[in-house]
Image: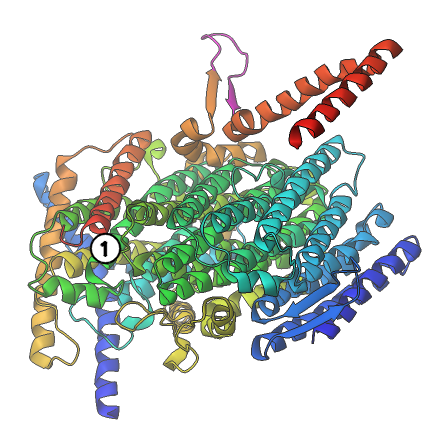
Amino acid sequence: MAVLVLLAIAGLLATGVAGGLRCRAADGRVVVYGASLGISVLLVGVGVAALALPAATLRLPLFLPWIGARFRVDALAGFFLIVVNLGAATASLYGLGYGRHETAPERVLPFYPIFLGGLNLVVVAADAFGFLFAWELMSVASWALVIAHHHDPRNMRAGFLYLVMANLSGLALLLAFGLLAGPAGDYSFAAMAASHAAGGTAALALALALFGAGAKAGLIPLHAWLPEAHPAAPSHVSALMSGVMTKVAIYAFVRIAFDLLGATPWWEAVLVLALGGATAVLGVLYALMQRDLKRLLAYSTVENIGIVFIGLGLALAFRADDDPVGATLALTAALLHVFNHMLFKSLLFMGAGAVQTATGTRDMDQLGGLIHRLRFTSFAVLVGCAAISALPPLNGFVSEWLTFQAILLRPDLPQWGFKVMLPADGALLALAAALAAACFVKAFGITFLGRARSAAAADAVEVDGFMRAAMGGLVALCLLGGILPGVLIDALAPVARTVLGARLPEQLTLPWASIVPVGAARSSYDGLLIFLFVAMATSLTVAAIHRFASHAVRRAPAWDCGFPNPSPVTQYTADSFAQPLRRVFAGSLLGAHEVVTLPPPGDTAPARIEKTLRDPIWEYGYAPVVNGVDRLAGVLNKLQFLTIRRYLSLVFLALIALLLVLALWQ
Amino acid sequence: MILSLLVQGLVQGAEMMLVLVAAPLLTGWVRKVKARLQRRRGASVFQPYRDLRRLLGKEVVLAENASWLFRTAPYMIFSFTWVAASLVPTFATGLIFSWTGDLIAIIALLGAARFLLTLAGMDVGTAFGGIGSSREAMIAALAEPAMLMIIISLAVLAGSSQLSTIAQFMLSPTVGLRVSVALALVAFVIVALAENARIPVDNPATHLELTMVHEAMVLEYSGRHLAMIELASSLKLLLMISAIGCIFVPVGLASSGAGFGGYAIGVATYAVKLAVAGALLGTFESAIAKMRVFRVPNLLGGALMLGLLATLLLFVSRGL
């Protein structure tokens, strides 16, 4: 099985080379995306098989000669192979259509399959060297894709920021593995897991893993690069970066925290819970303030990563208190949200790409009325918006519901940190869910509903079959995941058994496909019945009303209290929709400020409203570092303009200093 | 076995029809109480039924650029609300489908209805629709977390988020007087007022455009579509009152498998609860003024804090 995965990855890398050679040919797009699609579908199958089969290992004489390269496909890797390759398969299918409009295919086609190869290699690597190699391969390939459209200076800036953060993330993981390997320096995961580091080493390793994985996943305050870099890439790559690459970062955290490390101190679980809750709420607040559709989606990814980290923090908390049942429930909720978020975030980025293809803009205030022009895309995006807003009977609700059940499970944890943090995270999660619904009402309502705000939106044409097929597949999966969640929960049982040694009760044997995570008296949810009830109630009502009541329809101008204004400018815009929420929430958190200038009576000048937003995390977290590095560089810069005598004396002083160190060392 | 399943199915069906039939009556009753308090005779309590029949018989006047979403949303809103309302125990607990969703799922179903309603408000592209949707989003962003905090506090107390189990726990003598339950009740009432667009958050009878929230969203609706939306908001009011009744005043609730007599007592007490709650609501609305829209976050933020406080108390000590 591991051989199969490695062959597939080799195939992806070869496709990358082929893409480099044939990128200017007419069939380059078909070759690259077609091959990626085929290989991804194959790897989804391998992932499903890995959930059922025992772990497979493989050792190859690659990389460093005295270490070799180890690969392992266990249930955890299998689950993430499914996540990665399901996202990759739909993105490749979408790319078959989307790539037609690519202006610079030579900057996309070679790197796309290599990016996919890197993503897969991270998941199956089983030693620190292979893991970090794959991690950097993934980072570099995606960096190349982010700056594919390098003529826009904002994209170059996004690429630079991304590169800096990716390096920091890699460095933190390198140090974490160094700690885990210990003085003996055995870098295979098997040896690290067997040594089960504990105490201070484990605490430090977990903190480094949280930094490394969190920076890649977009955990606040390490998220600053994400909303710049994800929207800059072509849309199917944005879907992969938001939907899949952040999930690979979650994989890194789960692998280190639950598989390689033993028990960790309870206060670190509190730290993870606090960061997760803050990320969820701040991420969605940032998202709510955006008017660029893809930036909004990128910030919403930050929010969902927060939700996943709340689940992971709960699992750490329960594990610190020796409660395998609770830890299993929380980990299952987090991983289910990983899977669900991959589905709907890919779908939404593809929808944004379709809007961009059809209208040439992502600025919501230039759009509107697309529901009449892009009929299928608007339906697909509507489903995606409902799913990400955690509405039943779709899949997003199930994972958030499970996370709530995990919060409710153990109000009697002894540590005071949990007594405060668990209810607080419940409130933050609830707030994030409600704000997400507002955010996606805004995203869908401004983009697709109302009247067109520009000529481009009024003349938009529906996108081609490949793109619609990719979105349609994801819509079906979002619905299926919502009405048959038991299948997914049962599929996650081997994963939980691998890393925690326990599993949730079997769900598929329950009647009517309901899910009962802990016990029937505690809580149950039945997506299938909810779906059937709503569908039946709707169709019965429609049938009854059209049979017994009037079914006459007359089209007329909009009523609007008697004063309809024909100009589409009078509609609510993205900023005006968010205004009440900005006033309530963002005033203190994001420094939102409005200045209204009214001309004096008699003056015919227009009234103006100006809004300002600040990003306190950038201002207080990043800007001082950037300025400090700048200042240091300015000081060191003087060293470039010395005379030869000064250089010689500097060399001499350095030599003496080193000799002194050597002398004092002994 | 089959017979008992049949009976249980019948009881569940009867409950679904009961909420549907009782909802407009409750709305009429609240209006009647308010009219009497204003020393008017007011319309008959059956007036909402007549309004619905009249609306159903009229043609729909659809705005020229209304999309399919605008036309399908009223039916979806109605059925989401109806399914949510039939999951709340009204006169009996442990009905055959009561395990389909817990209290979190019921609130999420209402959230789905609201999601569609806010979208429908934006569909025609008028300024009033936008103002209504954007304010509704603000109210929901505070009311929903407050509601979830209440649910978490109740679920921690009862060890379950199923409404039937919570009601049975509240009936048991172990409950006693608790600070957390009192806080949750106050918060629940505030949230219920906001969710149903009642005074002081919104005015269901307003015709002054700038104060409207709910009415602004549905301004473009007419005919059978409007009838569906009106019926859905009546159902939502009934749902909230039933939930308050079943959690905080669970007296008279028939347990599963109660005989005909038990169900009859359940229905009778349920009717009394609705009448009392409707009268209280009418009195409260007559005695208080509507708030400015940007005062509402203070009120709802207060409810959120009360819910959080109730939960925190329970996490510190289960006895509070």
Q: Is residue A244 above or below residue B289?
A: below
Question: From this viewpoint, is residue B61 visible?
Answer: no
B142 or B275: nearer the viewer: B142
Query: Is the magenta region chiefly helix, strand or loop?
Result: loop
> x and y percent of residue B11 in the render?
21, 78
Under mark 1, the amino acid is Met
| Quadrant of res A501 | bottom left
The verdict on residue A156 being magenta is no
Residue picked out by circle 1: B240
> x and y percent of residue B290 in the render?
23, 33
> x and y percent of residue A439 in the render?
49, 44
Task: Name the image quarter holding the C terminus of chain A.
Answer: top right
Instruction: Magenta stretch: give its range.
Output: A597-612
Number of callouts in the render? 1
Query: What colour scheme was applied to this rendering of the protein?
Result: rainbow
B306 or A270: nearer the viewer: A270
Q: Is residue A539 above or below residue A637?
A: below
Q: Chain of mark 1?
A: B
Which residue appears at 72% of the width and 49% of the height?
A: A136
Q: Is residue B13 above or below residue A416?
A: below
Question: From this viewpoint, is residue A646 visible?
Answer: yes
Which residue appears at 78% of the width and 22% of the height?
A: A655
Task: Name the image quarter holding the N terminus of chain A.
Answer: bottom right
Which residue appears at 42% of the width and 44% of the height?
A: A271
Q: Secondary structure at mark 1?
A: helix
